[in-house]
Image: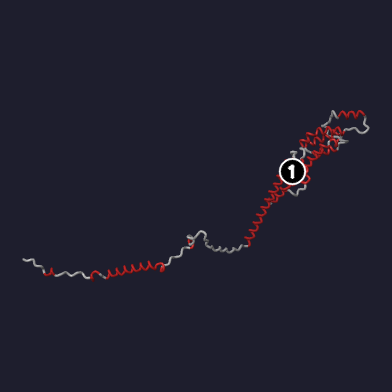
């Protein structure tokens, strides 16, 4: 048996043709790739012209600008006025008037209280016996229409003795005034003149008898009034002494008149200030 080749084996096998590889599906895939490539090239070359960039938002448009560049800002549009009802307008006007009145009452009350305090300070300063011009000027600024201040200014510049000082000085003044008031009349006897001369060395004055018109009774009443604070009454009593009694008491009388005048003037100023304060407080309470 020979190794003879089979005629069928010697016949060459057919090669797969192109029609089996390039199927319609393959052709579609190739066409799609080509389209994509061409489209990408077109977009890369002409994309900035075909698709321009969108403008930046309004709030960030000036973010990259120089700090010195100012962006114009449109003026705000004024809101239309809201019509006010007549009742609301009347109520608002009444409320504003009440507020104005309360403010005026507060200022008046404050001024009246300040005047009362200033006059109290003036009274305290005058009781020390020293000049009290500064306190008087303060009252003059707060109460410029007080006429008593003009009469009080000379006394404020020099001061006035205190009532305690006048009480302490009274016994010596009374001794001298009693001696002068008991001066014998012209033509008196020798014994009368001798007794009067001895009384200058040793004086006896009765201070417990308040009735009568003799010098001892007058001076006793004057001393009682001085101790009670009635300087004006004591001055009137001493001025009624007979003979040379008032002349002997002139120095004490002048000092007492100064103190009495200071007390009278300041009392009038304080009364006016307190009346103003009471009137303002009464008006504010209505």
Q: Residues within 10 Å of mark 1 (few under 14, many from 20)?
A: many
State the quadrant of the N terminus: bottom left
Which quadrant of the view contains residue 159? top right
Q: Is 282 placed above or below 195 here?
A: below
Could you say where residue 224 lies in the image, as x and y percent from the top left?
80, 35
Viewed as shown, does residue 215 lie left or right of 286?
right
Residue 227 drawn at (x, y percent): 78, 35
Residue 150 seen anywhere in this rendered image of the structure: yes
Residue farthest toward the left in the current orientation of the protein: 1
Q: Quadrant of residue 170?
A: top right
The extreme right residue here reads 187
Q: Residue 117: horizontal and vertical position, in percent?
A: 70, 44
- Is residue 159 shown above or below 86? above
| Residue position marked by numbered label 1 in the rendering | 133
Residue at the spot x=93%, y=33% of the render? 186
Q: Is residue 263 visible?
A: no
Give the vertical position of 116 relative to 222 (above or below): below
Count of all numbered marks drawn on residues in the image = 1
Helix, strand or loop under label 1: helix
Q: Position of residue 157 (x, y in %)?
A: 76, 42
- 54 or 88: which is nearer to us? 54
Residue positioned 50% across, 60% down in the render: 66
* 146 vs 181: above or below: below
């Amino acid at each position: 048996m020979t190794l003879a080749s089979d005629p069928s084996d010697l016949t060459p096998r057919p090669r797969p043709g192109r029609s089996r590889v390039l199927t319609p599906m393959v052709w579609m895939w190739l066409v799609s790739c080509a389209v994509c490539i061409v489209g990408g090239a077109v977009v890369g070359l002409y994309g900035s012209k075909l698709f321009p960039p969108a403008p930046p938002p309004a709030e960030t448009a000036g973010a990259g600008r120089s700090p010195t560049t100012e962006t114009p800002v449109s003026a705000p549009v004024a809101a239309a006025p809201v019509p006010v009802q007549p009742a609301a307008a009347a109520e608002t006007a009444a409320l504003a008037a009440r507020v104005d009145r309360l403010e005026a009452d507060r200022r008046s009350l404050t001024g009246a209280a300040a005047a009362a305090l200033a006059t109290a300070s003036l009274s305290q300063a005058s009781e020390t016996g020293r000049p009290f011009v500064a306190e008087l000027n303060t009252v003059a600024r707060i109460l410029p229409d007080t006429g008593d201040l003009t009469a009080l200014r000379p006394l404020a510049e020099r001061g006035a003795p205190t009532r305690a000082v006048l009480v302490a000085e009274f016994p010596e003044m009374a001794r001298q005034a009693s001696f002068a008031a008991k001066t014998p009349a012209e033509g008196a006897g020798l014994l009368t003149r001798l007794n009067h001369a001895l009384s200058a060395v040793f004086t006896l004055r009765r201070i417990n008898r308040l009735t009568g018109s003799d010098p001892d009774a007058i001076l006793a009443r004057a001393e009682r009034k001085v101790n009670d604070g009635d300087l004006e009454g004591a001055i009137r009593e001493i001025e009624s002494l007979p003979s040379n009694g008032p002349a002997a008491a002139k120095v004490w009388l002048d000092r007492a008149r100064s103190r009495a005048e200071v007390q009278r003037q300041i009392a009038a100023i304080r009364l006016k200030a307190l009346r103003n304060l009471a009137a303002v407080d009464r008006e504010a309470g209505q």
